[in-house]
Amino acid sequence: MTRLADVEAFVAATVARFGGVDILVNNAGTSAAAPFEKVDDAAWHYDIELKVMAAIRLCRLVIPLMQARGGGAIVN
């Protein structure tokens, strides 16, 4: 979920198999337990890519598909 090409492939495979998208549940994530001051920039960037940008990319891709079907639901 951290690379646009993979997200696009996931959505394309979903549409190919099910004919469209009616619901999107953004639930990708990890949990790295560490004190705030010990988390380095690389870990923050990965977390943002996985938890925030993946949801943005998926929403951006599926909203037009949902609109074409007359609606849908997104759970973040």
Image (cartoon, grey):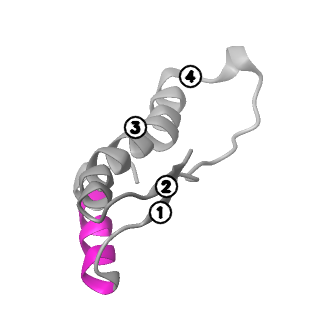
Is 31 inside the magenta-drawn segment?
Answer: no
Q: Secondary structure at mark 1?
A: strand
Task: Say the numbered circle drawn on residue 53.
Answer: 3
Read off the residue under disc 4.
40
Seen in the picture, residue 18 relative to 33 is either above or below; the reply is below
**Tags 1 and 2 touching, CB below 8 Å:** yes
Kindly report the distance in space between the C-alpha atoms of the residues bearing marks 4 and 2: 35 Å
Read off the residue under disc 2.
73
Segment colored magenta: 7-17
Task: Say the numbered circle drawn on residue 23.
Answer: 1
Q: In which quarter of the view is residue 55 placed?
A: top left
- Farthest residue in the front direction? 70
**Comparing marks 1 and 4, which lies closer to the viewer?**
1
Query: Is 43 on the left-hand or right-hand side of 45?
Result: right
Kindly report the distance in space between the C-alpha atoms of the residues bearing marks 1 and 4: 35 Å
Kindly report the distance in space between the C-alpha atoms of the residues bearing marks 3 and 1: 18 Å
Amino acid on which disc 2 is placed: Ala
Query: Is 69 on the left-hand or right-hand side of 24?
Result: left
